[in-house]
Image (cartoon, rainbow, N blue to C red):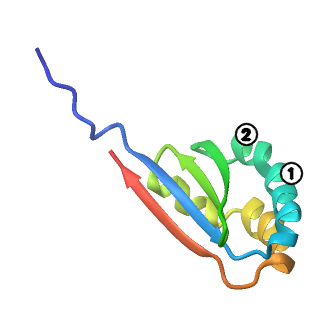
Amino acid sequence: MAIPTLACAEKAYLEITLKIDPQDRAAAGAVYTKYKQAFLTQIPGAQSKELLIRDDDVQVLHGFANRKQAEDYLGSELFKKDVVTSLKPLLKADPEVRIYASN
């Protein structure tokens, strides 16, 4: 019996942490909601998008089929022109961006 390898089961997560004042979090949530469906349907490899609200910040966790697709999203028009432009007035610091790969 062959044991399956995980080499072809790569998956990646893009985590963006945003410093946003509590009173502005509803506006940030509206940006998330506005672009979630476009992300899932237009971005190659996009699999999921979750909004995580914590006491200190807001995180958006994006799931992708692989690391390259997560990296490519950061250069996409949807991200640069739409999402970043909409969130910029709400940010209290530069976002923290991390990409995690799993296999």
* 10 left or right, relative to 14: left
Kind of element beneath mark 2: helix
The image quadrant that residue 96 belongs to is bottom right
Of residues 53 and 2, the one nearer the viewer is 53
View extreme (front): residue: 55
Label 1 crowding class (10 Å Cα cut-off): few <14, some 14-19, many 20+?
A: few
> Residue 98 at what x, y percent from top left?
50, 68
Three-letter residue code for mark 2: Thr
How far across and down, in percent of the image, does residue 85 sit? Answer: 84, 73
- At a point 84% along the width and 59% down the height, the residue shown is 31
| Vertical order, 62 against 81 (above or below) | above
Q: Earlier in the sequence, mark 1 or mark 2?
A: 1
In the depicted view, which residue is nearer to us: 67 or 27? 27
Name the residue located 75 percent from the left edge and 84 percent from the top edge: 92
The circle on residue 41 is 2
The answer to whether 97 appears left or right of 76 in the picture is: left
Instruction: Tell me the quadrant of the picture where the N terminus can be found.
Output: top left
Q: Disc 1 designates what residue? A: 34
Q: Amino acid at mark 1?
A: Lys
Quarter location, residue 89: bottom right
Q: Secondary structure at mark 1?
A: helix
Tell me if 80 is positioned left or right of 13 in this view: right
Assess whether mark 2 and mark 1 are in contact (beta carbons under 8 angstroms): no
Quadrant where the C terminus sits is: top left
